Amino acid sequence: MSTTAETTGRHDTAGGTPAEHARRLTDLVGDRAGGWDRAGVLPVDLLRGLGADGLLCAEVPVEHGGLGWSSVVNGEFTAHTGSLCGSVRSVQTSQGMAAWTVRRLGDRAQRAAYLPRLTGGELAAVGFSEPHAGSDLAAMSTTIRPDGDTVVVDGRKVWVTAARYADLLVVFGRHTEGGGAVVVVPSDAPGVRVEPVADPLGCRAAGHSAVVLDSVRVPTSAVLGAGAGLGLLVASALAYGRKSVAWGCVGILRACRDATARHAATRSQFGKPLAEHQLVARHLAGLVTGEQVATRLCEHASRCWDDGSPESVIATLLAKNESARRAAEGAAAAVQVLASAGAHDGHVVARAYRDAKLMEIIEGSTEMCELLLADHAVRTLDTTR
Ligand code: FAD
């Protein structure tokens, strides 16, 4: 009789409630996140272990080897990861986005082929961005050209989070017969080159890399969503990424709130704890408010997601934009309160400060999110009032 590990690729530790998984993650990360950040690399066995336990894409249904968690439960877990290590959370976001792309755009056979791999310890990254296609993804020039029962992929992707660790690259491009397509490319396929980004500002161990695809040939069965509008394909994947990043920002805010409260309560200047100086207390109040606002927006977005509500798109956009903004503000306030005590490379607030700034750029920059929110306001204007 086959064991659970044989049938699902799971580690023995896979069982447990979300709270138990969170405690185990706390133990696994311990005080190592600052060191990983400085070294610019995560231990791959840690990532594979989390992946094999289904924790990097925990919303994948049980029938495909996943944990079948709701978006709300996975969101809280993502926030917990984000409070411990922005780089691990980034890898989790990429894996979740890859799995969501397969669920959303793949057919039954593709879901059955790829999802058990993504919940069984293989790692994935998602590539949209190109040197000349950042905010404007319609400018993407990567091509996916059919050739018999294969396709040939040519292009260059940049800043692909987790590509350094990935076994599978989920690559977006133009289908040469019209529209867009997504292709799942093994990272060791001939013609694939992964070039790590040197010294990124934040999430420095997340494995950001450029990915060069030079006449890469994969079977047609690896193509998802062939011929659908490129914008639609990108929007499907980005929706998950935005939600995950938003929850990650909640984690940043929680880490900053706790570090700031601890320091302000224990460090005294002018004969009393910093927390009793009103201008410092204002920073703390801002952090508490930011964490609460971000949490409530993320919970709302995830509930909409779980309910399949059409409001999900705008709720996710709002959660991402506001959580990222609050995290960047909150992390800056945390560094201000800790002052020299937090001004060390690898200190939790210093890391948060650098990581949080990047959250305002990825999965739709602040400006792009604001444009979409403004567009929503105009489109949904009630002209009868
Ligand atoms: P640009 O598009 O050149 O924009 C520059 C500035 O101009 C921004 O502030 C932008 O908001 C603003 N701007 C642009 N157009 C407008 C407009 N119409 N109106 C107002 N303002 C505008 N890509 C992937 O494919 N996969 C990944 O996993 C991934 N991970 C990333 C991780 C990190 C840490 C970073 C930094 C980037 C990552 N990216 C990834 C790339 C990311 O998606 C892009 O950086 C992002 O879309 C912005 O594109 P850009 O950097 O080219 O900036």
Image (spheres, grey):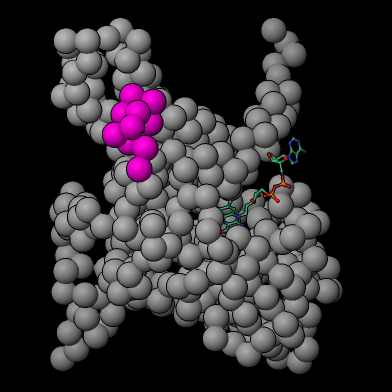
89 relative to 333, above or below: below
Q: Quadrant of residue 221?
A: bottom right
Q: Taken as a whole, is the magenta stretch helix, strand or loop?
A: helix
Q: Given the current orientation, which residue lies at the most extreme right position?
A: 177
Q: Quadrant of residue 296?
A: top left
* Residue nearest the observer in this picture, 135 or 228: 135
Where does the image place residue 55, in percent across and percent down from the top left? 31, 61
Where does the image place residue 237, in percent across and percent down from the top left? 58, 56
Where does the image place residue 327, in percent across and percent down from the top left? 44, 33
Quadrant, the C terminus: top right
Q: Which residue appears at 19% of the width and 23% of the height?
A: 267
Q: Which residue appears at 25% of the width and 32% of the height?
A: 258
* Residue nearest the observer in this picture, 286 or 99: 286
31 relative to 46, above or below: above
Q: Is residue 357 left or right of residue 192?
A: left
- Residue 102 makes an appearance in the image: no
The question of residue 337 being in magenta is answered with yes
146 relative to 128, above or below: below
- Residue 347 makes an appearance in the image: yes
Q: Is residue 213 left or right of residue 194?
A: right
The question of residue 184 being in magenta is answered with no
Find the magenta span and give its range: 334-344
Quadrant, the N terminus: bottom left
Q: Which residue appears at 53% of the width and 55% of the height?
A: 200
322 relative to 41, above or below: above
* Residue nearest the observer in this picture, 287 or 215: 287
Q: Which residue appears at 25% of the width and 75% of the height?
A: 10
Q: Is residue 317 left or right of residue 288?
A: right
Where does the image place residue 314, in percent across and percent down from the top left? 58, 34
Q: Is residue 48 left or right of residue 369?
A: left
